[in-house]
Amino acid sequence: MKKLYRSRKEKVLGGVIAGLKDYFGLDIDTNLLRLIVVALTFFIPVLAAVYLVAWVIIPEVPFEGGKYEEDTD
């Protein structure tokens, strides 16, 4: 089963956007996705609150054996 985690490698603020991108397998640049979310926040201000709640409830990628789970190298 696939789990949703906040990213540790690609995070700028909380890693929520990068984590959602990885979870849904989106083939889009993370920075572009961030810009889209910021732009949408101007039209849908509740997205800011949703982001903060997601930052609190979504766990970060676990650190196991010297690597993060999201590391594929």
Image (cartoon, rainbow, N blue to C red):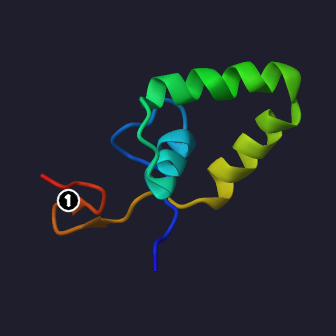
* Figure label count: 1
Q: Quadrant of residue 33?
A: top right
Q: Residue furthest left?
A: 73
Q: Is residue 39 above or below residue 65?
A: above
**Quick check: 70 left or right of 19?**
left
Q: In front here: 66 or 20?
A: 20
- At horizontal 78% and vertical 45% (from top left) the residue drawn is 50
**Quick check: 16 left or right of 10?**
right
Where is residue 53? Give x, y as percent. 74, 50
Q: Residue furthest bottom?
A: 1
Where is residue 6? Give x, y as percent. 49, 52
Q: In front here: 38 or 67?
A: 38
Quick one: SS at disc 1? strand
Where is residue 49? Give x, y as percent. 81, 40
Write down the residue under mark 1: 67
**Quick check: 9 left or right of 44?**
left
**Quick check: 45 left or right of 39?**
right
Q: In front here: 56 or 54?
A: 54
Q: Is residue 6 above or below residue 59?
A: above
| Dot 1 alpha-carbon crowd within 10 angstroms: few under 14, some 14 to 19, many 20 or more | few
Q: In front here: 32 or 5?
A: 32
- At horizontal 37% and vertical 65% (from top left) the residue drawn is 62
Q: Residue furthest front?
A: 27
Q: Is residue 39 above or below residue 13?
A: above
User: What amino acid does circle 1 point to?
Assistant: Lys
Q: Is residue 31 above or below residue 62?
A: above
- At horizontal 49% and vertical 70% (from top left) the residue drawn is 3
Q: Quadrant of residue 68?
A: bottom left
